[in-house]
Image (cartoon, grey):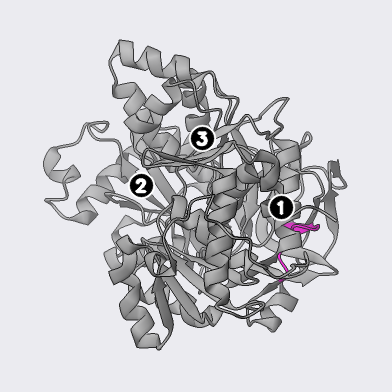
Amino acid sequence: MSISIFERSAKFARRVALLANGESRTYEWLEAQSRVRAEQLLRGSADIEEARIGFLMKPGLDYVVTQWAIWRAGGIAVPLCPEHPDPELTYIIEDAGVSLLLASELLDEKLRPIARAQNLSFRTTSELGGEVSLEENETVELPTLSLDRRAMILYTSGTTGRPKGAVSTHANMTAHMESLVEAWNWDSQDHILHVLPLHHTHGVVNALCCALYSGATVEFSRPEATQCWDRFASGEVTVFMAVPTIYSKLLHAWEQADDFTRARWTKGAAKLRLMVSGSAALPVSIFERWKVATGHDLLERYGMTEIGMGLSNPYAGERRPGTVGQPLPSVDLRIVNPESHKVLAEGLHAIEQGASGEIQVRGPMVFSEYWGRPDDTAASFEDGWFRTGDEAVLEEGYYRILGRRSVDILKSGGYKISAVEIEEVLRSHPAVQDCAVVGLPCEEWGERVAAAVVVEPGALLLPDRILSGQEGPDARSKAVKSILDGWTRERLAPYKVPRAWLCLDGLPRNAMGKIQKPTVQDLFAAHGEGPLEVSR
């Protein structure tokens, strides 16, 4: 039986576990504080028996102590996002059947009114008791937890519908951690600079739990570019994980810095042993620019809330841009034609060369259920394999993601088109800062390819009155189309060329940086794409 994350902490008692706001705390401290807080949650009972506890806290000491305390008391942790508006928080709280809400002092006023409206118990961390000294800590009896007990509910990003609560057991989480610790060579000498949100598997498991499972140090920081670069330059950080939008902002700061600062940052960053990108597709242009800035080939991986991590470029070996590598340890992965159910590739063996289909995964890290949705849970599995809804192809031993089947795989004129492929081409144009390709309903063609574009300031030789939107959104979009339409026709098959264009100031994204494509489709409808149509 695998050892749980908080049982391992005794091995690293005197090592620094957490750094936040200039304060450092050891594993011994974390064990003691989480034990005391767990006792407060028990309030005289022997076990809170998988009660769902929602907690709203910014990344830091309070968050980790509370997370461990919920688990140690026998509960299910439901982390909430401080950036979510009240309706989204309320939806998750109601959907998960939360019985107790916890908040830090800083977020008290955000969560207390929701608790009052839902008639739920609410406590701040100060009400659970302040920090105890290690000498004062008394051993309390906590419930014995089996690995099959539910541990956490993380909500899906909701890019194609209402978010669903994916339930992970302690066994699921332990398998997830052990797989990544093995694949990415985590050990107790590591020091991760943690800049990710803590309501998503990337921040919660990959960056936080894997580090603590290994006895490493977790340093919490804001994803502020100069601050991150200075921490790289300190020589203390060994691991960094972020989403592509953060890497883009870091690159912008590096490219704007003076020569001396840029050299200092580059020298420091080069000493890190691992830099990982995930949660959204990494543009090849960012991969290449990051290599120039730091000497690092970013390690891109593939995962999702329901499966944890499934694929990863190798820690030692070629990290191929535009791909997500091979299956991780303990992961079974295959590509299946969702219509015929024919297996097209399994593991590193391509049964039909170049054929794309849906990624399906099985293994001990795959979630146990969608909370309160037995029909959705059953529908998401095929013969024990989880159906991810993502399309991919196995090419020369590396998997390449083509996109989300529901929003990224477009069907136009009988062709199956990858929006991700078109986006990669568009991003290679010097005027394109960001883009999103979506399908718009069309009676004749099924779907028409449409591109929403954010342009680099000053990159297009167009009058300011047009780029600023003074002449209206249609004028700006038509101007962008006039430049990009012919350029894409030289690089893409005719059926892949966008037929509608929209120039935006920014793309709608969720907290993890994923583009909200249904919202992009709504923006096309709101602006009206009729004048932008071109014939085939």
Label 2 sits on residue: 453
- Mark 3: which amino acid? Arg
Helix, strand or loop at label 2? It is: strand
Q: Is residue 124 above or below residue 297?
A: below
Q: CA distance from mark 2 to mark 3?
A: 17 Å
Q: Nearer the viewer, residue 168 or 285?
A: 168
- Residue 367 in magenta? yes
Residue 303 falls left or right of residue 437: right
- Residue 145 in magenta? no
Q: CA distance from mark 2 to mark 1?
A: 49 Å
Label 3: how many residues lie within 10 Å, few (<14), some (14-19) or many (20+)? few
Magenta region, residue range: 359-368
Q: Nearer the viewer, residue 121 or 52?
A: 121
Look at discs 2 and 3 and give the one toward the viewer: 2
Look at discs 3 and 1 and give the one toward the viewer: 1
Is tag 3's residue or tag 1's residue first in the polypeptide sequence?
A: 1
Label 1 sits on residue: 7
- Mark 2: which amino acid? Val
